[in-house]
Amino acid sequence: MAVRPSRAVSVIAGCAALAGIAAASPAIAASDQDGDRVAVAGSTPAWATPAAKVGDTDAHAQRHIQIALSLRDQAGAEALAKAISTPGSPQFRKTLTAGQFNDRFAATQATVDQVSDWLRGQGLRVTGVSSNRHFVDVVADTGTLERAFGTQLATYRHKGKDGKIQKLVAPEKVITLPAAVRGTVTGVLGLDDSEKMSTPQNVLHPAPAAQAAGGANCATYWGQTVNTSVPQKYADQSNVLCGYNTAQTRGIYGLTSANTGAGTTIGIVGAYNGATTLADANRAAAKFGSPPIAANQYAVKLPDGGFNNDPTCEPDSWNGEQALDVQAAHTAAPAAKLTYYAAKDCRTLYDAMNRAVADNQVGIITNSWGNNGGEAGVAPTTRAQMDSIGVQAAIQGQSLMVSSGDAGDASAIAGKPTPQFPAANPWITAVGGTSVAVNSANKKQFDTGWTSSALVQSGNGYAPTQDKDGPFAGGAGGGVATTYDLPDYQTGKVSGTKRSVPDIGALADAYTGFAIGQTIPGQGYFEFNSGGTSLASPLLAGMVANAAQAAGTDRLGFLNPAIYSLAGTAAISDVTHHSTGVWTNFVGGYGGVTTPTTQGSYLIDFDQKPQTLQSGPGWDPLTGVGTPAPGFVAALGK
């Protein structure tokens, strides 16, 4: 499994460079004074161009950053992670504990101390170190950071996650470090604002008034309600679904009463923390048919120092994400424990993910967020941190899943088709999405790749909506990466020479949807159909928990080699194109996607390739190798 970044963005220094840090702090300071500094290639995002610069930054503004330290043996760690994750390998699923990983691969405490001493010598305040010694947390004002890292921070105009222009901070030129320090530092996170483009990947619920108006029109199963007063484009057309309940959602995948996820713990990574998450989940469980979540079944791991309520992160949007993730995972695996790892804001999500891995208290981790600007929207040194996090997770036997995104090929944001990050990282299981029809017996009638086209009624037919994104109204993210080579597990399954996204798919389309309950600040508690690949990832996490339970363990490790080995078997259902659609009186919104905002008479076409993505036989850029079949739970754990 040749999992590696392309040469152009490789920033991991060789092990021999570690010897350079052995000098004491005064030697490092002397090296700095002598001008012996080394550039950290890839420390600026692609969007920070001279043409986009609009001004300088406030020298007194405080920034929280993280110094990322390299593994002592990156190549050795990757080789071990591959062996532990590959079915048939003598080391398959023979994992290490977090302590064993740290002793063998993590930066030494001596390295942490010497780097911390250098940072303090530059006037930076060291506030903490992650338990796996991956990140050193630092706070300083902009002027001090500029002097320490040999750069200047500036403000740039950039198309943000909602497609609107926003102002983001980034270094004007690559940062530099003393040669002795550079040998162990792989990147500095937080000098640029790339992470502010990270957004939850769930549908934006309709306003309560529209929701209530649409409630009488929705179908409880496919075709149960059909608006015959509007044009019928398809013979099997349905009204928009009300949102599948527990029995319907579990029925899609053939889950039985024995599939509960007992003995496992699912980690959920997101920003902020909703005050009513558990109460809302139990209220929804009572309505839609799941058992309640016990008090000792749900835990929250808060960030040190509390939350940073940055309005550009849209804190309230993360409450909806948390609600969906918790309720979806619980529906699929009702006896699994759930631990929510909260980031202090949308700029520190990698830190929260690292905490979930470093703690090693959860065997399954789901992440329903990503950068809609694609790989190029994230500095290469930041992307490199996912290699270390993913490799550690694999060695410890943790399954790391990330939703593939809701903006399709992301061309409306990035300017060209690109997969989302971190889903594009080859150590991640990227989860795409499907539109699913469930019949009156709670069985899957059909599914197809999730990519929606919004059509508005025009006379006796329908015409494509003509907003900024044309008819595209949301869909699973996917495509071919530019920064990662084709991993071994995709060889023979995917054409080309680069990593392709996603790996597998699950229910995501909110027009078929999943019923949740959420308290919306200032408005009250509402129940509505939700979706996005934010739904697909925690649903898959729940099914992985069921597979671990069936195997008599709490973890199954990095999933991709096993998933691709199951492609074409009874464990995975190949998803192919199915032409149909649903009528609705409103069009939901997704981050980075422009859709109509007024009520009307709309038809949502399924899988008609409104951008460049469409499902088809074998691997496809909406659903990967397919979606879990009833045999998935038993087969994955073998």
Image: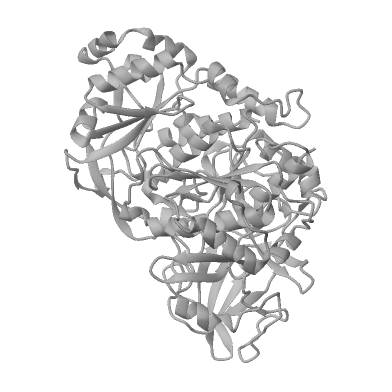
Q: Is residue 41 visible?
A: no
Front-most of residues 545 and 219? 545
Residue 229 placement, left or right of 344: right
Residue 500 placement, left or right of 378: right
Front-most of residues 481 and 536? 536
Quarter of the rendering containing residue 65? top left
Q: Is residue 24 above or below residue 474?
A: above
Front-most of residues 178 and 248? 248
Name the residue: 68% across, 55% down. Answer: 332
Its colouring scheme is one colour
* Image coordinates for residue 292, horizontal then vertical, percent: 63, 58
Q: Is residue 368 above or below residue 281?
A: above
Quarter of the rendering containing residue 81? top right
* Image coordinates for residue 321, horizontal then vertical, percent: 50, 57
Name the residue: 37% across, 12% down. Answer: 21
Q: Is residue 141 above or below residue 29?
A: below
For the N terminus, the image quarter is: top right
For the C terminus, the image quarter is: top right
Q: Is residue 460 visible?
A: yes
* Image coordinates for residue 139, horizontal then vertical, percent: 28, 33
